[in-house]
Amino acid sequence: MAANAGSCPALTGCGLGRYAVRLLKLLLILCLCAAGQAAAGPLEDGVAAARNGDYATAHRLLRPLGEQGNAVAQYNLGYMYLLGEGVPRDPAAAVSWYRKAAEQGDARAQFNLGVLYDTGQGVPQDYAAAVSWYRKAADQGYANAQYNLGLLYHHGRGVPRDPAAAVSWYRKAAEQGDAMAQSNLGLLYDTGQGVPQDYAAGVSWYRKAAEQGLATAQYNLGVRYERGQGVPRDYAAAVSWYRKAADQGLAAAQTDLGAMYYRGQGVPQDYAAAVPWFRKAAEQGYANAQHNLGLLYHHGRGVPQDHAAAAAWYRKAADQGDAAAQVKLGLMYGQGVSQDDAAAASWFRKAADQGEPAGQFNLGILYAHGRGVPVDAVQAYKWFNLASLRYDASDKERRENAVRNRDMVAAKMTPAQIAEAQKLAREWKPKADGSRP
């Protein structure tokens, strides 16, 4: 009964990036008509001073105007206090000035006030208040506010989660050319959230954002070309879009571009070319890339074979909960690291608990032979049985190997032990476990 060998690099999927809000960081330099005629000169001079980096002068000119109720001055004073330009940084003062302008209907101030509530700067974090201010700006057609309001509906922050409302707000911003809204709208079409699933529509929105240079959209467009969803499958086009996103430092794109070189899809197969792309993503802490780089060192593909380096990269991914890396790290004990069956069992268990069939199979091996764990036929049967059910149907050889090992163990078990093992297998549920042993 031999342990399973490693597998080829696994592809990363596509998905919405980290939840993020935008803060408008440019001074409001238009809308001078908001000032009275008598104040137009000082206002214009104050804004010009700020644009030239002379914030002390800007503050001296704008503060009296802000205190007189000029919304443009109030907005700019909020900006200066928020970032500490010409004055000590004071988010609470920024909130105060933004609020004065926002209450006069200034959409940019309403938006930035929403951001401060959203992120808890200068005020206690309050998603409901953020929604209220975003909505005021969004209703005036302000695209950034429409996008952020879409995010809050998407994630259910400050409002009940409502993908259809998220779609509506993303669409309003997307139709104004907002790249992030276009990308997120594409994702919702991709995943059928708030709209019927429609890969072609998703591709259309991804493309609009990708052509504006948004890395996440470029990556997701590459995924669709690789999988042939919404567009004919085209590995060369996938490589092209992955490369655009990878060149911007997006780890998922770097990983998938490396995988295309590894497999020779859309480019000639070239392990050496895969290595730097995996490394770029791995050094950003991207677990899939760390696993894949470990695989190349393990097998000496594109780099000299180096089991110690393989184990080190597998460990980085395994520590993040990557089940495939946990299995391979378990297999490395006795190769890249000192023989330690108990440590191997711990890593196999972490992968097995997540539902990784190779982890389940190898844990079964250890229980069958009493390596790193006590001999336990019931546990061995349970894990072999689970592995036989969880290996992909196309992986006939491994499925049959798991069944064969299960039946070898069963031949030495009593009917009661078999019944207990089958019960444990039926009751088993996968769980996440990314902690170290």
Image (spheres, rainbow, N blue to C red):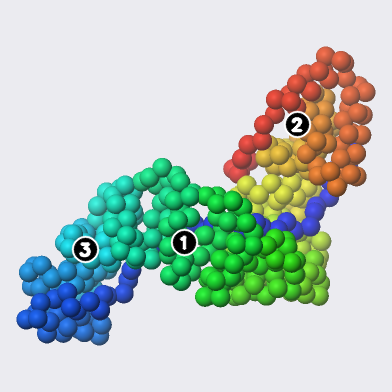
Vertical order, 243 against 126 (above or below): below
Type of the residue with mark 2? Val
Task: Residue under label 2, please give it.
Answer: 373
Label 3, label 2: how many angstroms apart (C-alpha)? 69 Å
Camera-side mark, 1 or 2: 1
Vertical order, 302 against 200 (above or below): below
Q: 129 or 364: which is nearer to us?
A: 129
Type of the residue with mark 1? Arg
Q: 437 or 140: which is nearer to us?
A: 140
Q: Is residue 399 left or right of residue 62?
A: right
The answer to the question of whether label 1 and label 2 lie on touching residues, with beta carbons closer than 8 A, is: no
- Picture residue at 47% right of the left edge, 66% below the top: 174
Task: Residue under label 3, please give it.
Answer: 105
Badge number at residue 171: 1
Q: Quadrant of the C terminus?
A: top right
- Picture residue at 22% right of the left edge, 76% below the top: 31
Question: Picture coordinates of residue 390 (x, y %)?
Answer: 78, 39
- Picture residue at 52% right of the left edge, 50% below the top: 194
Q: Quadrant of residue 10?
A: bottom right
